[in-house]
Image (spheres, rainbow, N blue to C red):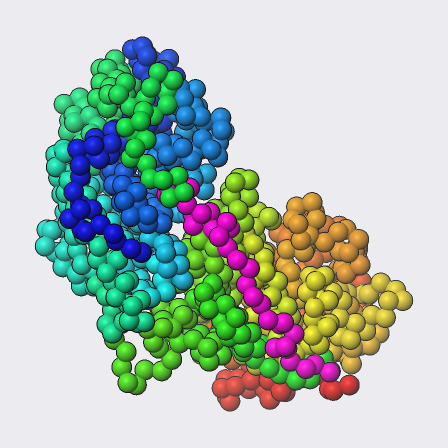
């Protein structure tokens, strides 16, 4: 960033600049109101009639004039400074204002030529808003310049901070609505400045937009005394700049001055840090508090009741225009108050004065490549993942911490990509066995560093904060603007930010339909400390719910992987880090676990997504097996292989086949998911008629959902997590959820197509082993020695 003008020069509005900004703002407000109300007569060439009004009035007016007011002034700042900037709007449903802004800048018509900059284009602009086949009322993925929808409130600041990490030339304007400010995620996201390094990162300018009301009443911060609000954000470490009022042109002058002051502070912070090569203490970054009336410039009163400045202006302040002639008259007066004849020429194009308020074409916020991250993204320089594998010369004979191998790979990715890769983890990097990254980078922390601190520094790039919302949102902003990363968290607590996963998935789903949206780096989630191995933490830490959440999303976005060992994990991680525009969910435990496949075997297995483990069963291919033992997930894979071993040793007449599934989406029919197995491949694994006993990491219903439509789907008998848990031993978790090796042996016999001699005795033996386990675990507080020490004898 550079600041060629002084702050006073940047703050001073010339008469021409004032006229241009005010004209642009009036034009944006006019287009906003028109989108909410009109289906015809876009330039009011004749008096409004009922036929001009949409049959359904949808949209949100109250926040919109404030959003466009700020946008106009930021555009002026960009024009004077050459600053690259994007604009994120937290206030929900402020869509018409930002759609109008991108139309006024010309970007909208460039992307959507049918919505041209003329009267016909305005007509289409109005008719498409919140109508069937049109666009939503949010600042959605269809809105040029947007990386943040704002429909589900709470995430504008985390997205803004994520967008500027390792993005030193970018300024992200983050408008926080005072309704959004009440949400938990937003309350927790102000701490982003504790991780923002002015040397290598860009800057975030939060603007708290206090208009005093949400959909049905006042907001907390809107009613607090200004001194308390100021103290709150000063306590967060911000330098607070306040602007208040509704008078014009006074508000233009005051906001221009506030924006100049904030920008000057940002430039000075970055210049000082970059010249010095670092900082001594965390800077006090600026923020602006803007107090303007809700529904500003709209109808002051409706039916004798105050509207401006109240919750009544939140959505459609004149809701009865089709039935009430007075409301229709007020709507026309309202729209004409913006003097559209001064703003649009005879053809409907913005006049020169309006266009003057736009920055140069390459700097328009609606056209910023940072808001279409695939345009600026560079692929990762990835190491050969094979170099981090573990030797496996005999399946199931040796143990390793699989995620520790991944940690070593991530460390090398950090080395090779110092400007475009980060790991985001809620204070659990070491716990999840990914600590090798600290050999390359410390944790990022801009607060005070004390002598006893370990692997923490101002220069660190490993992102740890005890907030799933922050970690998740930071990575979203990071990938949406073109960089790569991974979010690693305990499995159960991925549900804390599950709604963010849903929202990001929906964003990607919509983006795939827009040819102008470039593909972005995938959002990679590593779930470890899983339900099956949280014995000391107990039931609260035992929950595989995010798997269910991911299954609801479209096949062109959602991916779920269950690598059973280290080599498979490395292969899967390499694939995910190379992919674009997916949400990749990888589930594997961090504890020492048996290793099954050599690197070459793992690569082939993961490429297929599932395979028969010939060495685990006794199916020699001469006939169909009596039972198929399938598994997806590391712990249940071990139990399945152990069960197959028991059957092979004690009931060799029973023909068993073991199938391991890595890519869960492969179970879906190929016509329903891009990764779905063909009918032939599915039959090769599971046959067309043999019963399948499927041991699954998550809730059993997931597999039933996935195999729906496959031949004789009722033959799949799924065992998995059934909400049975406590503070107990690892093996007892499998017993409580009826997926232990002994339960699987019993179920296999009961569901096999034939019952060989000795089956009854083997069932009785398994039942006695379960009773023995129950007695032993209570008396000795640990599993039977034969369980944790179990392995396949080396071949």
Check the image and name the residue furthest to the top.
46
- Of residues 160 and 350, the one nearer the viewer is 350
- Of residues 753 and 523, the one nearer the viewer is 523
Where residue 243 appears, as percent x and y from the top left, is 15, 45
Residue 428 falls left or right of residue 544? left
Can you say whether 484 is above or below 300 in the image? below
Where residue 465 appears, as percent x and y from the top left, is 35, 68
Q: What is the quadrant of the C terminus in the image?
A: bottom right
Where residue 316 appears, as percent x and y from the top left, is 29, 29
Report the magenta residues as a range: 364-393
Q: Residue at x 23, y 45 (%)?
A: 209
Q: Residue at x 16, y 42 (%)?
A: 12
- The answer to whether residue 383 is magenta is yes
Q: Residue at x 27, y 44 (%)?
A: 80
Q: Quadrant of residue 67?
A: top left
Residue 302 falls left or right of residue 419? left
Can you say whether 14 is above or below 161 in the image? above
Q: Residue at x 43, y 58 (%)?
A: 478
Q: Is residue 656 visible?
A: yes
Q: What is the quadrant of the N terminus in the image?
A: bottom left
Where residue 613 appears, as percent x and y from the top left, is 75, 70
Q: Is residue 509 visible?
A: no
Q: Quadrant of residue 239?
A: bottom left
Check the image and name the residue furthest to the right.
622
Can you say whether 650 is above or below 242 in the image? below
- The answer to whether residue 240 is magenta is no
- Of residues 115 and 181, the one nearer the viewer is 115
């Amino acid at each position: 960033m550079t600041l060629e003008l002084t702050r006073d020069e940047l703050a001073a509005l010339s008469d021409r600049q004032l006229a241009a900004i005010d004209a642009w703002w009036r034009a944006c407000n006019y287009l906003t109101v028109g989108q909410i109300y009109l289906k015809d007569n876009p330039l009011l060439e004749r008096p409004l009639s009922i036929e001009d009004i949409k049959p359904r009035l949808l949209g949100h007016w109250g926040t919109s004039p404030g959003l466009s007011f700020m946008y106009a002034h930021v555009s002026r700042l960009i024009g004077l400074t050459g600053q690259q900037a994007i604009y994120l709007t937290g206030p929900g449903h402020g869509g018409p204002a930002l759609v109008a802004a991108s139309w006024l800048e010309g970007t909208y018509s460039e992307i959507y030529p049918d919505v041209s900059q003329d009267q016909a284009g305005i007509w289409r602009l109005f008719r498409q808003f919140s109508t069937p086949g049109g666009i939503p009322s949010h600042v959605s993925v269809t809105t040029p310049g947007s990386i943040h929808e704002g429909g589900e409130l709470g995430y504008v600041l985390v997205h803004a901070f994520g967008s500027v990490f390792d993005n030193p030339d970018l300024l992200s304007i983050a408008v926080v609505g005072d309704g959004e400010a009440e949400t938990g995620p937003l309350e927790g996201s102000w701490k982003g400045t504790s991780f923002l390094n002015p040397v290598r990162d860009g800057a975030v300018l939060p603007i708290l937009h206090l208009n005093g009301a949400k959909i049905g009443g006042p907001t907390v911060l809107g009613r607090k005394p200004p001194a308390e609000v100021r103290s709150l954000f000063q306590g967060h470490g911000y330098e607070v700049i306040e602007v208040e009022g509704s008078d014009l042109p006074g508000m233009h002058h005051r906001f221009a001055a506030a924006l100049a002051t904030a920008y000057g502070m940002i430039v000075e912070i970055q210049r000082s840090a970059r010249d010095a090569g670092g900082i001594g203490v965390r800077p006090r970054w600026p923020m602006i508090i803007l107090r303007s009336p809700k529904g500003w410039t709209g109808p002051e009163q409706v039916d004798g009741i105050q509207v401006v400045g109240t919750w009544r202006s939140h959505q459609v302040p004149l809701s009865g225009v089709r039935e009430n002639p007075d409301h229709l008259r007020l709507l026309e007066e309202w729209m004409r108050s913006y003097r559209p004849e001064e703003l649009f020429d005879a053809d409907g194009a913005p006049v020169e004065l309006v266009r003057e308020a736009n920055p140069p074409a390459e700097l328009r916020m609606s056209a910023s490549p940072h808001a279409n991250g695939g345009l600026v993204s560079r692929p990762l320089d990835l190491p050969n993942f094979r170099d981090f594998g573990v030797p496996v010369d005999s399946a199931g004979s040796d143990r390793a911490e699989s995620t520790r191998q991944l940690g070593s790979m991530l460390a090398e990715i950090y080395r090779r990509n110092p400007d475009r890769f980060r790991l985001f983890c809620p204070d659990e990097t070491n716990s999840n066995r990914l600590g090798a990254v600290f050999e390359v980078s410390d944790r990022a922390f801009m607060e005070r560093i004390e002598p006893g601190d370990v692997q923490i520094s101002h220069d660190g790039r490993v992102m740890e904060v005890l907030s799933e919302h922050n970690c998740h949102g930071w990575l979203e902003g990071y990938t949406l603007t073109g960089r790569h990363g991974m979010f690693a968290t305990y499995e159960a607590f991925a549900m804390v930010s599950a709604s963010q996963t849903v929202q990001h998935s929906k964003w990607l789903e919509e983006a795939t339909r827009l040819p102008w949206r470039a593909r972005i780096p995938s959002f990679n989630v590593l779930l470890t400390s899983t339900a099956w191995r949280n014995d000391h933490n107990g039931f609260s830490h035992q929950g595989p719910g995010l798997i269910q959440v991911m299954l609801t999303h479209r096949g062109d976005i959602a991916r779920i992987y269950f690598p059973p060992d280290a080599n498979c994990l490395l292969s899967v991680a390499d694939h995910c880090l190379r992919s674009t525009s997916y949400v990749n969910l990888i589930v594997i435990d961090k504890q020492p676990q048996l290793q099954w496949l050599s690197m070459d075997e793992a690569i082939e297995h993961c490429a297929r997504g599932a395979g028969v483990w010939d060495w685990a069963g006794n199916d020699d291919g001469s006939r169909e097996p009596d039972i198929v033992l399938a598994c997806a997930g590391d712990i249940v894979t071990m139990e399945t292989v152990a069960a197959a071993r028991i059957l092979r040793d004690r009931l060799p007449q029973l023909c068993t086949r073991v199938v391991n599934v890595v890519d869960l989406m492969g179970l879906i029919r190929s016509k329903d998911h891009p990764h779905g197995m063909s009918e032939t491949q599915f039959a090769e694994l599971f046959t067309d008629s043999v019963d399948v006993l499927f041991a699954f990491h998550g809730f059993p219903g997931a597999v039933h959902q996935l195999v729906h439509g496959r031949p004789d789907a009722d033959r799949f008998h799924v065992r998995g997590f059934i909400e049975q848990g406590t503070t107990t031993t690892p093996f007892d978790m499998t017993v409580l959820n009826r997926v232990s090796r002994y339960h699987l042996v019993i179920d296999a016999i009961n569901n096999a197509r034939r019952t060989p001699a000795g089956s009854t005795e083997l069932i009785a033996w398994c039942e006695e082993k379960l009773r023995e386990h129950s007695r032993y675990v209570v008396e000795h507080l640990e599993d039977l020695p034969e369980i944790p020490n179990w392995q396949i004898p080396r071949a």
